[in-house]
Image (cartoon, grey):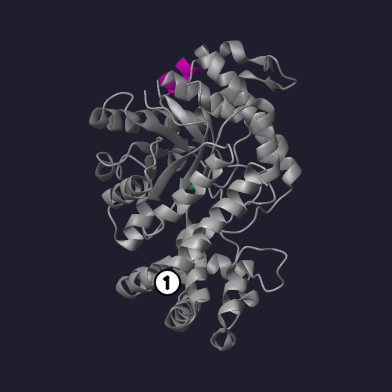
Amino acid sequence: MKKLGKYSIGLGDRFGHQGSAQLKAIIAASEKGIDITPVWNKSNREHNTIGTQPVDVRIEADLATGSAGFKKSYFVDADHINIDTVDRFIECSDFFTIDVASYIGLKADEKDILEFLSGAEKYTGKLKIAGTKLSFDTSKSQIKQFAEKYLFAAKKARDIYFKIEKGKGNGNFITEISMDEVAQPQTPVELLFILKMLAAENIPVQTIAPKFSGRFNKGVDYVGDPLLFAREFESDILVIDYAVREFGLPENLKISIHSGSDKFAIYPYIGSIIKKYDMGIHLKTAGTTWLEEVIGLAESGGEALDFVKELYIKSLEKIDELCEPYADVIDIEISSLPSKQEVSQWNSARFSDSLKHISGNSDYNPDMRQLVHVAYKLAALQMKDYFRLLETNEQVVSKCVYENIFNRHICRLFDLK
Ligand SMILES: [Zn+2]
């Protein structure tokens, strides 16, 4: 069976130009003793917005790894696919993020619910997670509620999984199940029963993406109490360890954190908890690399700076349209956005400092950063010019991409100096 390494990072790269710069960060980590498997992920939504095909991500990953002589394993992730969108990803992807969010809350057949309940009977009452201090009080009616909320989604996940398996063959791909794009977080005890359902459906899930408490807004830091997150995350880790032993799930099953980029406030907790229990992690990032392209172009000055200024000004005009698909994962304070007149006067440093995620810098503006995060569609509308500028200013841009992934993300997560 294809196995995902203990540590892995989902490297979203919307425009497919930064594979080598991203891989450089992975190689730098391995030189510091941290082996990270790179996974290039791109969702159906991103492909549709930009007009790319899933095979483009495969080409990028093969080129980046080939030209760097990278001999370790790497993957191409069909991110957030479902039964209707998976087909065109099957041939070129070897990692599938099966998104069941839209099926949560739909009720499975009564007979299936009863069958699940009878299999879960032994987990009723005081459920102690062996070898830990963690325990849950579960009642029959509570487990029934979980089944009514999640069993249909687990059955759908099975349908999607088997569709992929039919196309690719057993063991030839990594399976992730994602439930992060919902309003309510899943609690650790819910996660436990969800894993029971996935095991009962024979889905060899290697990564699972729950929704955690707090806000995981795109491109900016975690919003919430990091200590509460840490407690929840630690319980989830213990639940996973238990579920692997108890339900026979793949032994390398681990948590996948979506919108995982830029959550600097919680990285030290994630890092220390996975170390404490010797567990793995998959950190999924996407738009943080696109933002570095914009920052790099701003730093390059001249025509490149004019281009990104223009892009920002257009994003102000189209703010509703751009934000609409991402409404659940952004929080933009409109009054904090700099105006067209202000930005027109800015030099390279002022523009890049506003966008660069350095919270100690007084010019850093997380509202502007979130808006530009969702404005990649505007660059897609001027793809030829955009690519030409990326290519002319490649050195500056790739340095920004590398430093963001390595210094701000990997070093913080794994406590590298
Ligand atoms: Zn997600």
Q: Give coordinates of residue 158: x percent, y percent.
A: 37, 28
Drawn side of residue 336 relative to residue 260, left or right:
right
- Tag 1 secondary structure: loop
Q: Give coordinates of residue 222: x percent, y percent.
A: 65, 52
Quarter-of-image position of residue 394? bottom left
Residue at image position (72%, 72%) is 362
Identify whether 350 is placed above or below 185: below
Q: Quadrant of the N terminus?
A: top left
Residue at image position (45%, 60%) is 325
Identify whether 23 is placed above or below 240: below
Q: Give coordinates of residue 137: x percent, y percent.
A: 70, 21
The magenta region covers 110-116
Drawn side of residue 396 relative to residue 134, left or right:
left
Drawn side of residue 123 relative to residue 76, left or right:
right
Q: Which residue is mark 1?
A: 393
Q: Is residue 413 magenta?
A: no
Look at label 1 and name its amino acid. Asn
What is the crowding at mark 1: few (fewer than 14 residues within 10 Å), some, or many (at least 20)? some
Quarter-of-image position of residue 381? bottom left
Q: Give coordinates of residue 373: x percent, y percent.
A: 50, 64
Magenta part, dominant SS: helix
Q: Total marks drawn?
A: 1
Does the image show residue 181? no
